[in-house]
Image: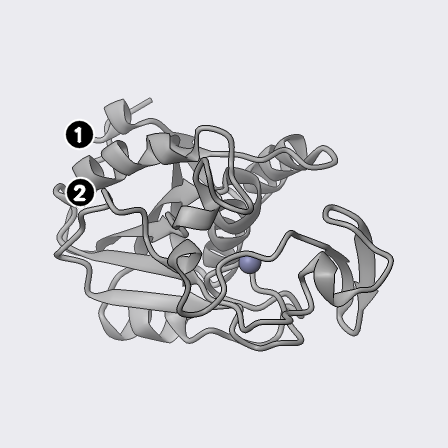
Amino acid sequence: MTAFKLGDGDVLLIVDVQNDFCPGGSLAVPRGDEVVAIANRLAQRFGNVVLTQDWHPRGHRSFASSHPGMKPYDLATLAYGEQILWPDHCIQGTSGAEFHEELHVPGATLVLRKGFRREIDSYSAFFENDRTTPTGLAGYLRERGLGRIFLAGLAFDFCVGFSAVDAARHGFAAVVIEDACRGIDVAGSLAATRRSLAEHGVACITEADLG
Ligand SMILES: [Zn+2]
């Protein structure tokens, strides 16, 4: 792999490094906390860093607890299609929704909150799960002249993967830094994510590939 030389048009997107997605949290990604140190390190190498934060109201439709008789990881059909149901997580204003306490990215210029509409989940940092409601991130990046997006965070096979694919769909160059991510692997989601990234021309690299 050729080394990537970083420049002014590059941005690091650190996805959902929040307590509920780390060990001890309500929707813990196995070894999710291992991304914290590498995300901190990467952030120092980028002139532009954006954080995303999963940010749900109580009673969110993606929670199994909002669907009597269903349990976490069941598939439900919502107005916009199939939705995996999750344990309650990242509820606005709770400690579970806070960033991991060791995440240290003082230079981040934007914290993008997503999933705040009660009826729609949002894996992607660009579109909510109805695939049509934009979060505003594409406009922010374009206005700031940021054309290449490097992604790190949680979880590789959900919010990182969907964000990377949507970045590519928007015409941005998208690069996933895979050793700065951890996955969940629900119902083959890891393999599906790898296929989707390849189909959309998203590169997967490691920290060592950054020149
Ligand atoms: Zn969520």
Cα distance between the residues tagged 1 and 2: 7 Å
The picture places residue 167, in percent across and down from the top left corner, at: 45, 57
Q: Is residue 166 above or below residue 174?
A: below
Residue 52 in view here = yes
> What label does residue 6 carry, if any?
2
SS at mark 2 in the image? loop
> What label does residue 211 carry, if any?
1
Dividing the picture into quadrants, the one containing residue 199 is: top right
Q: Earlier in the sequence, mark 1 or mark 2?
A: 2
Dividing the picture into quadrants, the one containing residue 68 is: bottom right
49 relative to 197 in the view: left or right = left
x 61%, y 65%: residue:
121
The picture places residue 171, in percent across and down from the top left corner, at: 44, 60
x 26%, y 39%: residue:
39
Tell me if label 1 and label 2 are in contact, CB under 8 Å: yes
x 68%, y 37%: residue:
186
